[in-house]
Amino acid sequence: MRFCPGRTAVTGAALVIATAPALGQTTSAQGWPSRVPTIVVSFPAGGPTDVLARTVATDLADRLGQQFVVENRSGAGGNVGAASVAKAAADGYTLLFATTSVINNRFMYRNVPFDADRDFVPIVLISKTPIVLVAAAATGLKDLAALIARAKAEPGKLNLGSPGHGTAAHITAEMLQRLAGFKLTHVPYRGSAPMIADLLGNQIDVVSDLLPTQIPQLKAGKYAGIAVTGAMRSAALPDLPTVAESGFPGFEATSWNALLAPAGTPPDVIGKVNGSVNAYLRSDKGREDLAKFEMQAGGGTPQDLKAFMASEVAKWGPIIKAANITME
């Protein structure tokens, strides 16, 4: 089945992704899914998370012979959508296309209307998206060592842009600064577009952003890449080193996407979705899709995702608290 970009949903609206059962495939009336499941995206339509969710939903529809609905329920940094899934019936017909916010928001918001550990059961990690540090052309900075040296020599002079206060890009930059012992003045933007405009105009010195957003400008040589925060280099920018290669072995920080279900969802449903998503991630199409988004494939068991989420809590909690990052 082809996904039609022109049918992107608006916030609160639903997009039905339909397919006919494959030849020879039957779906039991008593089995799951016997009716349309909903995948909730906690952010507005059109962004990378939304587009990936619709891509995954299309593939699930093809593999399971049932329509899937992708619904955008945005607000409060992802809390609105996540809370709606946490309160949904645990029957496999409401799933959450989760992001890093489902972990980090507990540390930033005073009142989070769900408990991620108690209210959800993990299904599968879908993808990781690295962050990239870049520097405006006027700074003359070309690598991480030079950035750190200048920041230490001129404390507080260099500023750092991020696509928003409390975003994965912001928190990643805080972790690196604390690890390397330097400090930049944070300037939060409302998204990447105005930040890129200021970077091109040399109005901001350094930017931390999701890698896919920055690739066109970096390829065009509009400004300099400093380092990527993933475990490996980007295929699109093979000459740009990782933070780990730049003097900080073992450093890895990414935004990520995963599927979660309400606690109590039957294990056989969890297993069916997990198997289908893993098959997609291993397929040629899955690899091609994630390569377009500059994302690294996830996969693995629900237990793998549970362990990964626990490691993310341990990683980001102390950073968010130490940097006093709050959202009201």
Image (cartoon, helix red, strand yellow):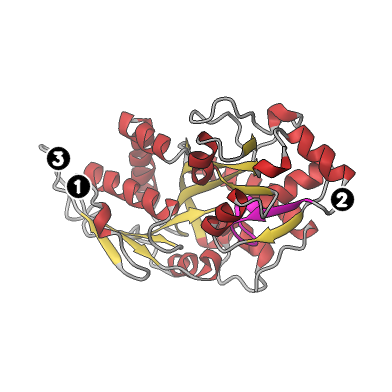
Q: Is residue 249 visible?
A: no
Q: Position of residue 79 (x, y in %)?
A: 53, 67
Name the residue that disc number 2 marks: 155
Is residue 58 placed above or below 283 in the rendered structure?
below
**Tags 1 and 3 touching, CB below 8 Å:** yes
Q: Is residue 324 left or right of residue 6?
A: right
Q: Provide the secondary structure element on which disc 2 rests.
A: loop
Q: Residues within 10 Å of mark 1 (few under 14, many from 20)?
A: some
Q: Locate the N terminus by quadrant.
A: top left
Mark positioned earlier in the residue sequence (1 or 3): 3
Q: Give the quadrant of the C terminus.
A: bottom right
- Would you place residue 54 above or below residue 153 in this image? below
Amino acid type, label 2: Pro
Write down the region rendered in magenta: 158-170
Helix, strand or loop status at disc 3 = loop
Residue 170, image x and y in percent?
66, 54
Q: Which residue is mark 3?
A: 22
